[in-house]
Image: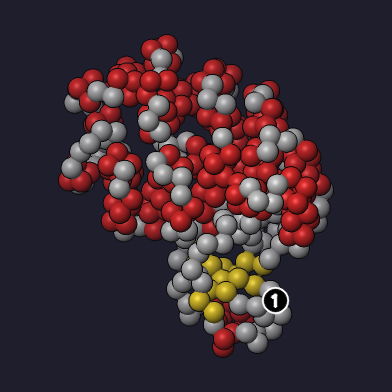
Amino acid sequence: MKRGLIIGIVAGVVIISAVFFLFKYTQKESIEDIRSINSEDAVENVCKNYTGLEECSSSLECEWRLNENKCDLIKITDNQGELDQNLEEINPNNLSNTLCNQLPTSSEFGLDDNYYCLAVVNNNPDFCEKILGDIDGPAIPGESEEDLNDKTPYYICLSAVNKDFSYCKLVKQDAKKTCYNALAQLSWNIDVCNNMDYNPSDKQECYFNFVNALYWENKSEEIRTDYCDKISDNLDKNTCLAFKERDVSLCGSNKNCLTFFPQELSFCNGATFKDEDECIRDRALVKRDISICDKLSDQTGRDDCYGDFANHIQQNITICDKIIGISRKRGCYINTAINLAK
């Protein structure tokens, strides 16, 4: 779907329910023998023979990127000049703006993410208005009429820039959780979650995600007891208090709490209290050791681990470069840009 923004933003700001994006630091190898490729079919056929990030400057003006264990042709956006002009108008030397401007793109993505990123890092809703222009632009093959006219990315952008939850009420139902969670953490205001009147479970998850993010980012002193009181489940409430005091003894025998504190890697062996990959990711975040992410055998798990590490532990663009999945990488860059702009 053209609106790549929705799921991507929460990927970095919500730790538990990992719900995007790239400055071109990634190492690339030039491939001289594909410079003369002139058809998309030929490009796709050659692509299948490669397993890494590649680049070409053929008549197709394409880039190679490994996506979900397969190569994907990514075309350079026709609107790059417009974005470059926007940067010149604000501050072209600002790293956050540069990151927002140079997200990787493909037929799956329009410019919504770029505009969202620029809007938030510059606190400028004018960039949100540009999303409306993208919505009115040409349809992507296979895009439904509903998707074409969907203003959800626009409303999420306005909610983030204006710190106003009322815009979250206007988004599509499947994006409401993303909107509220992102806004709560962008504004560091847990009361944003209070307005999630459509699903009590999502509201409780929003409360927990909020205090969990404060804990990961070494801001436990900002967790108040009344934040924990909002959490109805007693085990999760005790976990919140453990976050607040940074005291593992408050976890008791609750492994869902213990996982957020120092444990041996063997703690995750055959984990049944949560996904084993998530448990290993917790070990990386707790120990602040990104090499633990490398131990994950599943690429999606590694991508999630790198993304969460970059967004909560060490805001370093080179960590985003480790991510293979395009959407997750876009999310990592957007959240890094936003974090650097704070």
Q: Quadrant of the C terminus?
A: top right
Task: Write down the quadrant of residue 47 in the picture.
Answer: bottom right
Dot 1, how many residues are within 10 Å of its Cα: few (below 14), some (14-19), or many (20+)? some
In depth, the one of 131 and 3 nearer the eye is: 131
Q: Judge whether 227 appears above or below 337 on screen.
A: above
Any part of residue 106 in sight = yes
* Side (left or right) of 268 relative to 29: left
Q: Residue at the spot x=60%, y=49% of the render?
A: 95
Q: Badge 1 is on which residue?
A: 60
In depth, the one of 324 and 120 nearer the eye is: 120
**Kind of residue at badge 1:** Leu
Query: As drawn, which residue projects farthest toward the front?
Result: 93
Residue 256 spot, x, y in % from top left: 28, 31
Task: Write down the quadrant of residue 8 in the picture.
Answer: top right
Residue 66 spot, x, y in % from top left: 50, 67
Q: Residue at the spot x=75%, y=51% of the render?
A: 88
Residue 107 spot, x, y in % from top left: 67, 61
* Side (left or right) of 105 relative to 324: right
Q: Residue at the spot x=74%, y=56% of the render?
A: 84
In depth, the one of 99 and 112 nearer the eye is: 99
